[in-house]
Image (cartoon, rainbow, N blue to C red):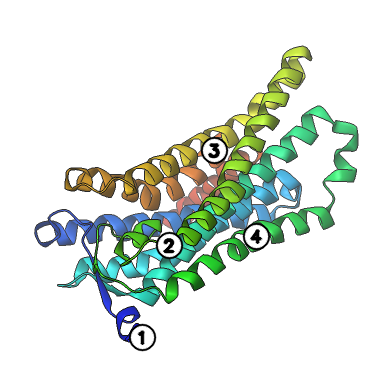
């Protein structure tokens, strides 16, 4: 009986007037996915190709953009299928896997932002120790831990959820998240406690650490000369903008998905769409425009492409 229940398909009831706007949904999502892949991949390739960008700060930026590509690639194909299908359904096991990917990569993003804030903290507040602390070996360890820790944190909760019976098969969303527990016949206290532990370890602690490091940077910069303040503003502002943007979206997502009311269906959809559309596009735009070295290489790239196109046109 358990196998029958847990292999039952769940209806995704998060879309608003999908029958009417099916092809508009698809066009927006497909266009956004292409932009996400192109923008993020372009900056990652620039960082990989140009040796002067092989510094910890840019390596972390590349990792953050790769994280966005992984999230989008894991999410969008199912969305394409859903908006073009007559019925928006997903198996319970696939729903749990989607939940796992959603929070694992979301947790990795917070840990990467924490690593980037620490990199800026060491660079500005402890410049003499920077080459020793931010060695390639240490960066490699940080990057591995940034992806492994969320996976190891969220994997047990997925295993625990896999054998729980379902009594409701209509999910009020387009991507499976923690509100899948509302489909269970009986709530699990153990799952709630473990979810709280994951929330503290993967989200709350990194956020507090980020706020602490940028507060220290702000204090040190205020007491230092104009050159230090300029360096802090140029390198920290893009990170802060991305951090605030992502934190607000996740905070809204956590709050709204907990409110079980039909009045919030449109709002819930808009917030989810912002997470899957807006944020992965927002990151490369911010880093491409605000990080001087990346912006410089982007201008060279597009300028050289323009020259090549002009020469071909003349011939």
Please tell me whether mark 4 or mark 3 is closer to you in this view.
Answer: 4
Name the residue beneath numbered marker 1: 3
Q: Nearer the viewer, residue 294 or 108?
A: 108
Residue count near mark 2 (Cα–Cα under 10 Å), binned few <14, some 14–19, many ≥20: few
Quadrant of the image for the C terminus?
bottom left
Q: Badge 4, how many Cα within 10 Å: few under 14, some, many 20+?
A: some
Q: Which residue is identified by label 4?
A: 149
Which one is nearer the viewer's eye here, 158 or 308?
158
Residue at the far left: name it. 20
- Disc with the residue nearer the chain's start (2 vs 4): 4
Q: Earlier in the sequence, mark 3 or mark 1?
A: 1
Q: Tell me the quarter of the image containing the N terminus.
A: bottom left
- Percent from the top left, x then y, of residue 299? 56, 42
Say left or right for 18 vs 226.
left
Q: Is residue 186 left or right of residue 42?
A: left
Q: Nearer the viewer, mark 3 or mark 1?
A: 1
Please say whether residue 298 is visible from this viewpoint: yes
- Element under label 2? loop
- Residue 44 on image: x %, y %: 60, 55
Q: Earlier in the sequence, mark 3 or mark 2?
A: 2
């Amino acid at each position: 009986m358990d196998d029958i229940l847990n292999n039952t398909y769940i209806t995704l009831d998060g879309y608003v007037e999908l029958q009417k706007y099916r092809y508009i949904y698809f066009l927006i999502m497909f266009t956004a996915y292409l932009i996400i892949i192109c923008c993020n991949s372009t900056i990652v390739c620039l960082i990989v190709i140009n040796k002067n960008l092989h510094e910890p700060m840019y390596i972390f930026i590349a990792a953050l953009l790769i994280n966005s590509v992984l999230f989008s690639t894991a999410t969008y194909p199912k969305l394409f299928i859903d908006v073009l299908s007559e019925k928006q359904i997903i198996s319970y096991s696939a729903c749990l896997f989607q939940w796992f990917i959603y929070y694992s990569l979301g947790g990795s993003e917070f840990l990467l932002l924490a690593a980037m804030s620490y990199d800026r903290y060491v660079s500005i507040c402890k410049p003499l120790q920077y080459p020793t602390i931010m060695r390639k070996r240490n960066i490699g360890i940080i990057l591995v831990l940034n992806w492994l820790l969320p996976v190891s944190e969220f994997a047990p909760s997925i295993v625990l959820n896999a054998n729980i019976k379902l009594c409701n098969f209509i999910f009020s969303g387009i991507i499976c998240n923690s509100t899948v527990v509302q489909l269970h016949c009986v709530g699990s206290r153990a799952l709630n406690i473990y979810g709280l532990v994951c929330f503290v370890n993967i989200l709350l602690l990194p956020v507090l650490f980020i706020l602490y490091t940028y507060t220290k940077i702000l204090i040190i910069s205020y007491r230092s000369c104009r050159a230090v303040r300029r360096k802090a503003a140029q390198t920290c502002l893009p990170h802060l903008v991305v951090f605030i943007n992502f934190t607000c979206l996740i905070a809204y997502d956590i709050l709204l998905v907990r409110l079980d009311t039909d009045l919030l269906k449109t709002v819930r959809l808009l917030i989810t769409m912002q997470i899957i559309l807006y944020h992965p596009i927002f990151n490369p735009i911010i880093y491409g425009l605000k990080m001087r070295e990346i912006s410089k290489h982007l201008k060279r790239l597009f300028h050289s492409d323009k020259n090549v196109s002009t020469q071909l046109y003349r011939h």
